[in-house]
Amino acid sequence: MDTKKLEALLLAVERGSLTAAAEEMGYTQSGLTNMMNSLEGELGLELLIRSKSGVRLTAAGEALLPYMQSLRAESRALEQAIRTFRQGRADTLRLGAYSSVARQWLPAMLAEFRKEYPDTDVPMAVGGIPDIFDKLRGDDLDCAIVSYSAERCHGLHYIPLRDDPLVAVLPGAYRPEASAFPVSGFSGVEFLMPSAGFEADITPVFGQRVENVASRVRYTNLDDAAIVSMVEHKLGVSILSELVMQDMPYNVRTLPLDPPSCRRLGIAMAETRSGDPKIQRFVDCAQRVIGALYA
């Protein structure tokens, strides 16, 4: 049943006149009359008695009145709930990020965003790769700053921000023979694989399989700081990114990889959200901040 027709019917009964109801709803009298005829035709029942003095319900209309009033109330409640939800989503940007991004990039990005859009609340979820992507695909986040891989980002809309170079993380006592660390140097040493998901960023360094070069791989599922601490204590070596290693307070040495490699950081969102104005506003702020940080 068309709820607009139902609204018009009940208003006409309450006002006692099709003319009064038409004026209140912004219809012509003939237009409202046609709506009532259409509604009665759909139901196969006469609902209104029309006379020169106005309109009133037929016996069938009286019997159905409580149900029609209930349906109108439910329809209005639904419309209000939709408006409330839209308003809430319009004023909130649910943002996800890796911990390294949260430490190094987000403060400046959020400061810029809040300066331009002070009425938009930005609740944040900070976590590892699997956690952030699960939240993004589960619609628990509007967008997230993540690293790109074809498999992880399949079906998502992705906007690149910056390539984050990967570096070898070595004990502080290591004395390099060159300005970069050759990938072949990981052969025969204990290689500490970082937290879950980072493997997808590291594996291409070794030619799609870590075991191609690093035959002794320990899958730790530890956070970044724990990995670096283990390297400091000479329990192995690892690969992390420049952003992860920035300001790490440990006695370790980092060297660029030879050949060079990087992870691509950007903003991911559901394809259906790619035109969302509040996400685009954050993307614009993020791009400006990255441009200023790395000018």
Image: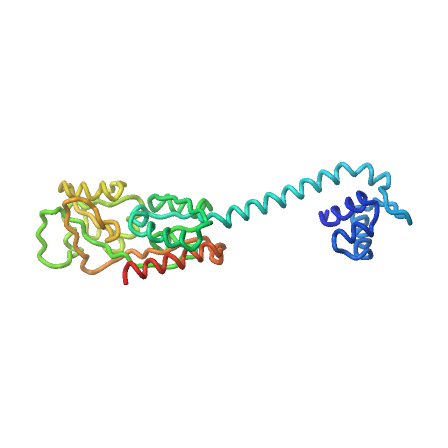
The image quarter containing residue 62 is top right
Would residue 196 appear left or right of 214 to someone viewing this image?
right
Q: Nearer the viewer, residue 225 or 236?
A: 225
List x then y, in percent, for residue 54. 87, 47
Q: Nearer the viewer, residue 177 or 283?
A: 283
* Residue closest to the far right: 52
The image quarter containing residue 294 is bottom left
* Residue closest to the far bottom: 295
Would residue 89 appear left or right of 205 to someone viewing this image?
right
Q: Residue at x 23, y 55 (%)?
A: 166
Q: Nearer the viewer, residue 223 or 184?
A: 223
Labels in figure, total: 0
Q: Is residue 77 above or below residue 158?
A: above
Would residue 236 appear left or right of 203 to someone viewing this image?
left
Q: Residue at x 31, y 50 (%)?
A: 101
List x then y, in percent, for residue 245. 22, 49
Q: Residue at x 13, y 46 (%)?
A: 171
Q: Nearer the viewer, residue 70 or 188?
A: 70
Give the quarter of the figure containing the C terminus: bottom left
What's the image's color scheme?
rainbow
List x then y, in percent, for residue 226. 22, 40
List x then y, in percent, for residue 128. 33, 44
